[in-house]
Amino acid sequence: MINILLEGYGINADYLYDDLKKYILPNYSVAVMAFSFRDSDVNNSADWNLLYSKEKGIYYRGIVSGFTAYGISENNIKFVNYFEDTKEFAKQKIENADIVYFLGGLPDRMMDRIKEFGLVDVLRKHNGIVMGYSAGAVIQLSEYHLSPDHDYPEFQYYDGLGYLDDFYLEVHYENTKVQDEAIERVLAERGKTVYATALMSGGIIVDNGNIKLLGDVKTFDMPVGC
């Protein structure tokens, strides 16, 4: 399995393109898991469309253009629609895709909706490429942490989809005190490496267990400052 963990939806950024073009091939199809939206922003299909639809979505073009830069046809990029897709149709989109792409937002709410649709098993069985940014990166881990921010006021661990179990991930890393304290806590409590992808300039590829760091990524194996 190939796992790609990124900072944002600019997946064709200069620091990523040469490495990702080996994996994102022109004949591939993509299932975009648009399940990570905030409840305060999206309450119905009309709200969802304002974010992700081809006609109105403010994020649609940025997401799609990342893949078309690698030669993938826009027609081969399907968004999984929480409000309009049946559970079976959502499952079919995932099973027919070469790439499953998890968007940023709220990873715990994305996981809730994945469970609601009964998609945990079909996602775990996907044997192609799994990729995502921000929330869509951390959800690929067996367990992930979130350092405090405006969405999550307290440090907490959460269950992910379980593709990766050897490390933890601090996204949007800016060397802040709150982030460093979260990393130190993970190191002390879980005893595993923490990779910190710098804000909008870091990424990770895990190719059948082989880890490659892209751009600006810091590795923490011991408490910060040691």
Image (spheres, rainbow, N blue to C red):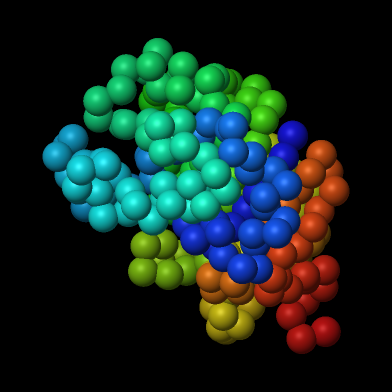
| Residue 122 visible, this orientation | yes
Total number of numbered discs in the rendering: 0
Extreme top residue here? 88
Residue 225 to residue 58: above or below? below
Residue visible at 52% across and 40% down in the picture: 72
Residue 35 shown left or right of residue 210 in the figure: left
Residue visible at 53% across and 20% down in the picture: 96
Residue 223 point in image, percent of width and height? 77, 76
For the residue pair 11 and 195, the one nearer the viewer reads as 11
Residue visible at 27% across and 42% down in the picture: 54
For the residue pair 73 and 32, the one nearer the viewer reads as 73
Residue 40 shown left or right of residue 155 in the figure: left
Residue 195 to residue 47: above or below? below
For the residue pair 211 and 117, the one nearer the viewer reads as 211
Residue 111 shown left or right of residue 204 in the figure: left
Residue visible at 74% across and 80% down in the picture: 224
Residue 141 point in image, percent of width and height? 65, 45
Residue 26 point in image, percent of width and height? 59, 38
Locate the C terminus by quadrant: bottom right
Residue 65 point in image, percent of width and height? 43, 52
Residue 95 to residue 147: above or below? above
For the residue pair 198 and 27, the one nearer the viewer reads as 27
Locate the N terminus by quadrant: top right
| Residue 195 visible, this orientation | no
Residue 218 to residue 163: above or below? below
The answer to which quarter of the image holds residue 95 is top right
